[in-house]
């Protein structure tokens, strides 16, 4: 932040001499709205896709009078509310795809729970104080859960308590005899109880979460409890036993990742490999802490009795706290980036909602191409800010459509944009993508290829009316020679064919 | 600490001497050397990692050592990590020696107290909940020694008056150290259990993840602040003559909010409100913003759209809270003749009333293309004249009081450099909170 940004300044001087007319304003979306704060309802990702009713907008042709940017116009547009990139929250893309897999997890968990419940009712509870202590721990973990956090970060204490109960073989030297059935029943009952306040606060659905919890705990218990109850580990040395628990927990985590990735794959059609990889990568953080705490609790209860439980959950609580703060600042940051991206729209350089649509579509294409994690974040930010270089232009490009400009001009705007992005303190990778978005595709990083193709598609398709999407896609295919990477265009075609994002005006 | 005073050298030398005395009985003590080696290596490793990520110190390992080993041996375990890990500021050697001596003494004291309370046996045959008592006493001793020595170095090296040197040190560090102490206790209990050091290492994993998340938090926050800065700069560049205006309005809003007795969080929010109040000018043609001479009614109408453009831009940023309302309503007037909605009196959000006063004050006291800067006294007089019709009298009074108390030293001069100083923008008020939080995780 030491040099006086040449781009902005040169632009400023030029504008001081000749200020051209603003770009024709985009057609206002005619939804007069008196309440200016529709924040919660305006989440584009969670809205069921095929409803044409919320934004029936004719973006036929730009209306030339600047007065049309009147008071109600900007307020009526849905606000881009960036979502965490979680496949679990990615919304119903095409629910018709293999519903069997989607039902497998909840139905399997339900059946399992019923069988376990019946078995416990038949045989009664063993070691009630232990069951009660772990039940209370799991329930507490669920109670302090907060809405809006990602699934794997939601209730770490509950998960750790449940895993510890599944892997418990002794309490202060006394062997325990709770089997698989009792483990599942106690965990499920406690989780349900703990979820009551969460649901009452309107925290949202918990079914998915509970189903995964039941299945993973059952997996861990099936691996451990029968052998432990037969005394198979009695002769094992201490460190070997600890390592066994760690290995079991690693297996359980893997199972959990598959349980999360499979339905996401079935629901969205994104490739399974990257989804699983992303789940596993996400586990390095909080899930490893949960597993470690689960193992430590199981061992500590074996050594020191139930007193160990409250003491040993402290570090995990600390972890949860740190994660919450991190998640909160991450969400805030996303919102700010989105606001910055809208500067071009409000300044009249690009049509309303363009940045948001390009970001959403780019994200979907990126997933289809197997990007994950940090790459997707970079892609999202770059897509949001890809037009920001236009802020430095003296003459606004008509309707903000850069795809029709000469290559040199496109590259100049891209470089200006990169310079602006560099000033914002965003990851330098984002600035690189913005800078290189106009280069020939062979020299571009993948994210820049995606942004370029999606931007061109969005610009070409938005004015063409019904069927314009297909025409635009065809144009991209024909232009593929050097501008748009063929694999990206094909991925875009697949994403569009999958539905819900076909009409660019629907955002 | 550019030139370290001689008495600071003497003080450090004294502490080093005391540390050496603590270590001296080592040859006579029966010490499990492999445990000392393992703990020392663990501490040194985690310290190097933690320092490079700027996440504070790794006390759990040290405290576990204090719970497991005889006092001199526990103190020895702290030595390599403290001596080897990187130091941020000059003089490097002196700082390393100081840190090593300080930690050696603190760990020795903790271990001594723990030993004295019979904590060793409680750890070996885990005697819950009694084991918490010696551990708690040890944590208290550790914290006490650390803060005592820290206060001393502040007096001798930083020349802080002795009365203020110790203020807040102990209360600020006790909670984080207590959490570290619990983790250390867990390590110690598992270390002595049949499961051995493998299980003890597992305790560190959640702590490490917490540190990692904390470091990420800081990184993201810094990036976020830079982004907000970029937003403000974009406006400043467009609207050339108001350079630094946003910053100063943020500062004045903050002064008013403090004077009105708002809590820290609201003060911070109002600062953002002041900084971002004109962000909507991004949507107004530069030609109009820079026009010399009178505006036509049509042009005026276009400029008066800027609060709404601004609100449209920031309304998606949830953390701004009531600052968003301030952006939308900062041109409302108490008598209802303002824009965009013509709200009257109390219908105008308080945040907007604060920003309105701050905005007008800075507009009068800085040089603009159409007028020279007026002295603060004249501006205050003008504000008081308009109080009631245009401004909330209570807020004007608050500004006047605050000006009387602190004066007006705008951070950026009207004709200064185009770049907003990097350290002025968000989050300075959070510094104190963070340094405490940093220790906590």
Image: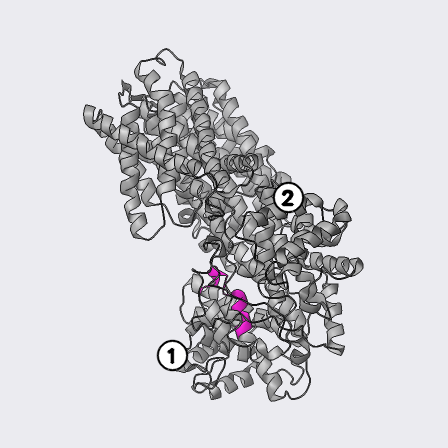
Residue where numbered disc 1 is placed: B346
Q: Quadrant of residue A174?
A: top left
State the residue lying farthest toward the front. A467
Q: Which mark is residue B64?
A: none
Q: Who is closer to the viewer here, A281 or B167?
A: A281
Q: Residue at 49%, 23% (x, y): give it.
A: B36
Q: Nearer the viewer, mark 2 or mark 1?
A: 1
Residue where numbered disc 2 is placed: B91
Where is residue A158 shown, x and y percent of the image? 35, 37
A32 horizontally vs B365: left or right: left
Instruction: Tell me which chain the residue with mark 2 is part of.
Output: B
A298 vs B280: above or below: above
Range shown magenta: B308-321
Q: Who is closer to the viewer here, B428 or B91?
A: B428
Q: Secondary structure beneath disc 2?
A: loop
B234 vs A311: above or below: below
Mark 2 or mark 1, which has the lower sequence index?
Answer: 2
Can residue B131 be seen in this snapshot? no
Q: Residues within 10 Å of mark 1 (few under 14, many from 20)?
A: few
B234 horizontally vs A233: left or right: right
Give the prevailing secondary structure in the magenta stretch: helix
Question: Are labels 2 and 1 assigned to the same chain?
Answer: yes
Q: Residue at 71%, 54% (x, y): give it.
A: A475
Q: Residues under labels 2 and 1: Cα distance? A: 57 Å
Whether label 2 touches label 1, CB < 8 Å: no
Query: Does the segment drawn in magenta span residue B193?
Result: no
Where is residue B24 shown, x and y percent of the image? 50, 25
Where is residue B162 shown, x and y percent of the image? 47, 53
Q: Who is closer to the viewer here, A20 or B276?
A: A20
């Amino acid at each position: 932040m030491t040099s006086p940004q040449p781009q902005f300044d040169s632009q400023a001087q030029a504008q001081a001499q000749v200020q051209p007319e603003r770009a024709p304003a985009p057609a206002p979306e005619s939804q007069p709205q008196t309440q200016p704060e529709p924040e919660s309802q305006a989440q584009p990702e969670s809205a069921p896709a095929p409803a044409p009713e919320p934004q029936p907008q004719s973006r036929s042709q730009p209306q030339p009078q600047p007065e049309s940017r009147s008071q109600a116009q900007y307020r009526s547009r849905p606000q881009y509310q960036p979502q965490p990139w979680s496949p679990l929250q990615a919304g119903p893309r095409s629910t018709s795809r293999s519903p069997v897999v989607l039902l497998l997890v909840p139905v399997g968990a339900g059946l399992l729970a019923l069988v376990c419940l019946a078995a416990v009712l038949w045989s009664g509870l063993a070691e009630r104080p232990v069951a009660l202590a772990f039940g209370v721990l799991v329930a507490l973990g669920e109670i302090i859960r907060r809405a809006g956090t990602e699934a794997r970060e939601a209730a770490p204490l509950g998960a750790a308590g449940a895993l510890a109960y599944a892997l418990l073989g002794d309490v202060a030297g006394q062997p325990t005899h709770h089997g698989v059935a009792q483990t599942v029943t106690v965990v499920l009952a406690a989780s349900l109880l703990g979820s009551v306040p969460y649901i009452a606060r309107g925290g949202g659905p918990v079914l998915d979460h509970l189903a995964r919890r039941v299945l993973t705990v059952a997996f861990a218990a099936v691996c451990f409890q029968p052998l432990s109850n037969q005394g198979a580990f009695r002769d094992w040395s201490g460190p070997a036993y600890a390592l066994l628990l760690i290995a079991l927990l690693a297996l359980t985590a893997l199972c959990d990742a598959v349980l999360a990735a499979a339905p996401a794959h079935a629901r969205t059609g994104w490739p399974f490999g990257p989804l699983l990889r992303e789940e596993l990568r996400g586990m390095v953080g909080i899930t490893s802490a949960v597993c470690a705490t689960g193992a430590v609790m199981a061992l500590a209860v074996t050594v020191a009795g139930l007193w160990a439980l409250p003491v040993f959950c402290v570090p995990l609580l600390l972890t949860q706290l740190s994660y919450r703060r991190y998640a909160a600042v991450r969400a805030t940051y996303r919102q700010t980036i989105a606001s910055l991206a809208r500067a071009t729209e409000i300044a009249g350089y690009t049509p309303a909602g363009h940045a948001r649509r390009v970001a959403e579509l780019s994200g979907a294409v990126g997933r289809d191409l197997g990007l994950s994690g940090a790459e997707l974040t970079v892609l999202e930010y770059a897509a949001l800010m890809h037009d920001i270089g236009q802020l430095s232009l003296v003459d606004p490009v008509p309707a903000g459509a850069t795809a029709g400009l000469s290559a040199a001009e496109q590259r100049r705007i891209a470089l200006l944009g990169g310079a602006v992005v560099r000033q914002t303190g965003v990851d330098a990778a984002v600035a690189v993508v913005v800078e290189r978005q106009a280069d020939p595709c062979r020299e571009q990083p993948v994210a820049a290829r995606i942004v370029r193709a999606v931007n061109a598609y969005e610009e070409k398709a938005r004015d063409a009316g019904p069927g314009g999407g297909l025409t635009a896609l065809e144009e991209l295919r024909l232009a593929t020679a050097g501008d748009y990477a063929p694999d990206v265009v094909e991925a875009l075609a697949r994403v569009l064919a999958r539905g819900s994002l076909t009409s660019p005006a629907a955002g | 600490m550019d030139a370290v005073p001689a008495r600071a050298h003497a003080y450090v030398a004294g502490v080093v001497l005391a540390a050496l005395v603590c270590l001296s009985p080592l040859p006579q003590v029966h010490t499990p050397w492999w445990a000392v080696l393992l703990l020392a290596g663990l501490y040194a490793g985690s310290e190097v990692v933690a320092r490079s990520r700027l996440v504070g110190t790794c006390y759990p390992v040290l405290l576990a050592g204090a719970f497991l080993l005889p006092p001199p041996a526990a103190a020895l375990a702290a030595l390599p990590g403290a001596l080897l890990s990187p130091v941020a500021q000059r003089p490097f050697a002196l700082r390393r020696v100081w840190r090593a001596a300080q930690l050696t003494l603190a760990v020795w004291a903790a271990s001594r107290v723990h030993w004295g309370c019979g904590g060793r046996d409680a750890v070996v045959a885990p005697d819950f909940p009694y084991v918490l008592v010696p551990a708690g006493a040890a944590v208290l001793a550790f914290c006490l020694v650390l803060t005592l020595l820290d206060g001393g170095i502040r007096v001798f090296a930083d020349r802080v008056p002795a009365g203020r040197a110790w203020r807040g040190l102990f209360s600020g560090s006790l909670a984080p150290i207590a959490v570290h102490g619990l983790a250390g206790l867990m390590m110690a209990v598992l270390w002595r259990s049949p499961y051995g050091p493998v299980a003890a290492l597992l305790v560190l994993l959640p702590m490490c993840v917490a540190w990692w998340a904390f470091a990420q938090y800081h990184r993201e926050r810094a990036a976020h602040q830079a982004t907000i800065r970029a937003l403000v700069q974009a406006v400043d560049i467009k609207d050339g003559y108001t350079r630094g205006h946003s910053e100063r309005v943020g500062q004045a809003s903050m002064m008013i909010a403090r004077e009105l007795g708002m809590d820290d969080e609201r003060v911070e929010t109002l600062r953002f409100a002041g900084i971002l109040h004109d962000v909507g000018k991004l949507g107004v043609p530069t030609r109009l913003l820079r026009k010399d001479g009178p505006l036509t009614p049509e042009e005026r109408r276009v400029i008066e759209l800027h609060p709404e453009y601004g609100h449209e831009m920031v309304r998606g940023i949830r953390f701004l809270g009531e600052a968003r309302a301030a952006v939308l309503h900062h041109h409302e007037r108490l008598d209802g003749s303002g824009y965009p909605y013509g709200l009257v009196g109390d219908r105008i959000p308080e945040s907007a009333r604060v920003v309105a006063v701050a905005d007008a004050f800075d507009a009068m006291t800085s040089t603009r293309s159409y007028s020279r800067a007026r002295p603060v006294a004249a501006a205050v007089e003008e504000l008081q004249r308009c109080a009631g019709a245009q401004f909330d009298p209570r807020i004007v009074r608050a500004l006047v009081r605050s000006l009387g108390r602190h004066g007006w030293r705008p951070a950026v001069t009207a004709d200064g450099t185009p770049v907003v100083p990097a350290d002025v923008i968000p989050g300075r008020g959070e510094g104190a909170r963070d340094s405490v939080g940093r220790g906590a995780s």
